[in-house]
Image: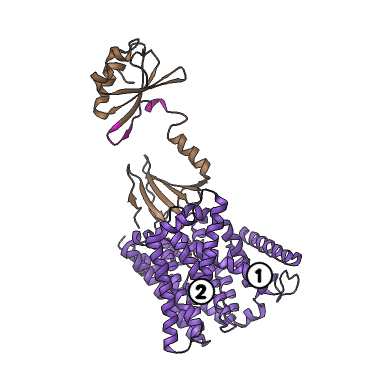
């Protein structure tokens, strides 16, 4: 027991110290937690806190559960409806370009069809956490494009839920049309049942676990979240989607804000373990061997995001600088890419996916905030015909 | 993108998913102040100079903790100090008006009781409190005598305020 506590304490501290150093030069924390896992892992010389990533497996999966649970808690239909058709169009264009580009790139790599489907998500979905943090830290909350950026992120979050629901049956590698249809059916039945509870039964679920006492309340909603995740996993739907959907259910209950406040420190701590544990499994020489695909994916992501940003800005008739801000802020990749990397590894897909995801997230984690903080300079170099003239 | 839905009194509101709410307030000099209230309780203030286009960065940004923001709001709301020039500021809720007036030595009401003045019958306004020598007389009795220097808190309809001022405070203003 002492050994395990030493390992876990070392993991937390290593992640915290590396992320602190990175914060000084304005880097986001998520990729740095992962970097700490690579540096202090078994594949790199020097201190290794944890010899076997599987030692942290349960705690890391709690990180995944809390990440998705919190995402569900933050999700409200109002945020989508408020944006109207224009936001739906902007989000649709963003997803079509990014997921489409990622899927084409995945097939071009030739690692396999299931691998391509994972890579589409890795490349296509931005990091809600990093995008939100960037907007706050760059003092852009008052900007005209900020609502649009956050709206696109909300649409992406909804997409993540549907995408994970589709992905799991595909990854489990069921053979035959009937078996595949059954697992799709199970996934969507699960979504529909929990979606209906969110729509009509959230008051009941809220009362079931509600308590004036923070301690009792926390214990109950954690139990509910972890149970739903486990149940989903048992049904073959993926624990992530179970945690997300129970978050959506509780988001509609009156105690949503209180749950968010109470679960936040848990999410931060266990998510750090999840990112660290992902880093542990990464071998630097494996990352070097997929340097070519990483470089290609980064260039593709920058181009596709710039295009999607310009297209969304045209819809909203925004100028050059807001248009550039949209494309470059939403470029950040982080937790979802890593979640998908972990899902792919767990499903036994091509071993190159994990190092690919690690390298890709690291490069974009450094390049994204750097580019986003220099948009005024970049915006002046955007060719005028690409910008909406009717303002 | 527009600045959001009108939230009343020239304030525009827009929800920022995952962050909180954003309020845009016009300033007297033609500039604007944007307040972002985070779910975490933190508040950001962005100040834009007069004539700033939507693409222009703010001329100042500052952030406050929940506690600081509440104190800042209370200062602006006049909880600590009311500038002399707006001493007779009125608060209107629906068609209900709450106002406070100061009685002078030469006011018609000085040294008369509320019953003698027939304030409610003649002005249709009600004195709900008297602030006197740092103490408060809540819901004063009809026999309560009004003295010079009293601050009267009155409630009624906006259109009745003028008659009340003439009857109780006298020429000039409260």
Is residue A149 or residue A262 the one in the foreground? Answer: A262
Q: Position of residue A6 (x, y in %)?
A: 74, 64
- Is residue B88 inside the magenta stretch? yes
Q: In what element is the residue under mark 1?
A: helix
Q: Position of residue A292 (x, y in %)?
A: 57, 82
Residue under mark 1: which chain is it in?
A
Apparent side of residue A298 relative to residue A322 in the rendered image (left or right): right
Q: Residue at x 48, y 40 (%)?
A: B70
Sequence-wise, the earlier of marks 1 and 2 is: 1
Is residue A106 or residue A240 the one in the foreground? Answer: A240
Q: Which residue lies most toward the bottom here? A: A176
Q: Position of residue A148 (x, y in %)?
A: 39, 61
Residue B18's place in the image compared with A309, above or below, is above
Discs 1 and 2 lie in a common subunit: yes
Apparent side of residue B163 relative to residue A50 in the rendered image (left or right): left
Give the residue number, with chain letter if any, for mark 2: A238
Q: Quadrant of the C terminus of chain A?
A: bottom left
Q: Quadrant of the N terminus of chain A?
A: bottom right
Apparent side of residue A375 relative to residue B5 in the rendered image (left or right): right
Per the rendering, the colour in which chain B appears is brown
Badge 1: how crowded within 10 Å, few (<14), some, or many (20+)? many
Is residue A366 or residue A358 the one in the foreground? Answer: A358
Q: In what element is the residue under mark 2?
A: loop
Q: In the figure, residue A220 lies in which quadrant?
A: bottom right
Measure the alpha-carbon separation of dots 1 and 2: 19 Å
Apparent side of residue A317 relative to residue B68 in the rendered image (left or right): left
Chain letter, colour purple in render: A
Residue span colored magenta:
B81-96
Q: Position of residue A331 (x, y in %)?
A: 48, 68
Q: Kindly identify which numbered label has been placed on residue A56.
A: 1
Q: Residue at x 35, y 67 (%)?
A: A88
Residue under mark 2: which chain is it in?
A
């Amino acid at each position: 027991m002492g050994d395990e506590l030493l390992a876990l304490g070392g993991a937390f501290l290593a992640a915290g110290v590396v992320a602190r150093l990175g914060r000084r030069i304005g880097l986001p924390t998520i990729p740095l937690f992962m970097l700490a896992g690579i540096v202090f892992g078994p594949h790199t010389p020097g201190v290794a806190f944890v010899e076997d990533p599987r030692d942290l497996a349960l705690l890391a999966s709690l990180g995944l559960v809390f990440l998705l649970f919190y995402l569900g808690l933050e999700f409200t239909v109002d945020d989508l409806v408020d944006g109207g058709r224009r936001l739906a169009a902007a989000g649709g264009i963003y997803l079509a370009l990014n997921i489409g580009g990622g899927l084409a790139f995945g097939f071009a790599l030739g690692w396999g069809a299931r691998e391509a489907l994972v890579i589409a998500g890795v490349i296509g979905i931005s990091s809600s956490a990093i995008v939100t943090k960037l907007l706050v830290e760059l003092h852009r909350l008052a900007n005209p494009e900020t609502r649009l950026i956050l709206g696109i992120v909300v649409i992406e979050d909804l997409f993540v839920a549907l995408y994970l629901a589709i992905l799991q049956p595909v990854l489990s590698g069921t053979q035959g049309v009937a078996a595949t249809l059954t697992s799709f059916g199970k996934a969507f039945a699960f979504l529909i049942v929990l979606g209906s509870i969110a729509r009509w039964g959230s008051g009941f679920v809220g009362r079931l676990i509600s308590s004036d006492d923070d301690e009792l309340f926390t214990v109950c909603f954690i139990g509910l979240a972890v149970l739903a995740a486990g149940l989903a996993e048992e049904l073959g739907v993926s624990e992530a989607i179970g945690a997300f959907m129970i978050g959506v259910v509780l988001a509609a209950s009156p105690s949503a804000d209180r749950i968010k406040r109470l679960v936040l420190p848990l999410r931060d701590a266990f998510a750090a373990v999840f990112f660290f544990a992902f880093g542990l499994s990464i071998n630097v020489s494996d990352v070097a061997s997929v340097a070519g695909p990483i470089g290609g994916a980064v260039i593709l992501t920058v181009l596709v995001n710039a295009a999607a940003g310009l297209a969304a800005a045209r819809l909203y008739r925004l100028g050059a600088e807001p248009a550039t801000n949209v494309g470059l802020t939403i470029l950040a990749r982080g937790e979802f890419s890593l979640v998908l990397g972990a899902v792919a590894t767990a499903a036994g897909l091509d071993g190159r996916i994990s190092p690919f995801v690690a390298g890709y997230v690291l490069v974009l984690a450094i390049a994204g905030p750097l580019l986003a903080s220099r948009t005024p300079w970049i915006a002046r170099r955007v060719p005028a015909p690409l910008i909406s003239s009717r303002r | 993108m527009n600045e959001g839905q009108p939230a009343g009194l020239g304030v525009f509101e827009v929800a920022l998913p995952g962050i909180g709410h954003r309020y845009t307030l016009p300033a007297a000099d033609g500039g604007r102040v944007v307040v972002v209230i985070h779910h975490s309780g933190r508040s950001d203030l962005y100040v834009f100079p007069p004539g700033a286009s939507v693409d222009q960065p703010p001329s100042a940004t500052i952030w406050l903790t929940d506690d600081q923001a509440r104190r800042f709001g209370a200062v602006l709301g006049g909880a600590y100090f009311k500038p002399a020039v707006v001493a007779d500021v009125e608060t209107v809720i629906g068609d209900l008006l709450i106002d406070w007036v100061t009685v002078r030595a030469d006011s018609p009401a000085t040294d008369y009781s509320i019953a003698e003045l027939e304030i409610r019958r003649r002005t249709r306004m009600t004195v709900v409190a008297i602030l006197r020598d740092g103490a408060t007389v809540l819901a004063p009795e009809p026999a309560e005598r009004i003295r010079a220097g009293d601050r009267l808190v009155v409630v009624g309809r906006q259109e009745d305020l003028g008659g009340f001022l003439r009857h109780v405070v006298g020429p000039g203003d409260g």
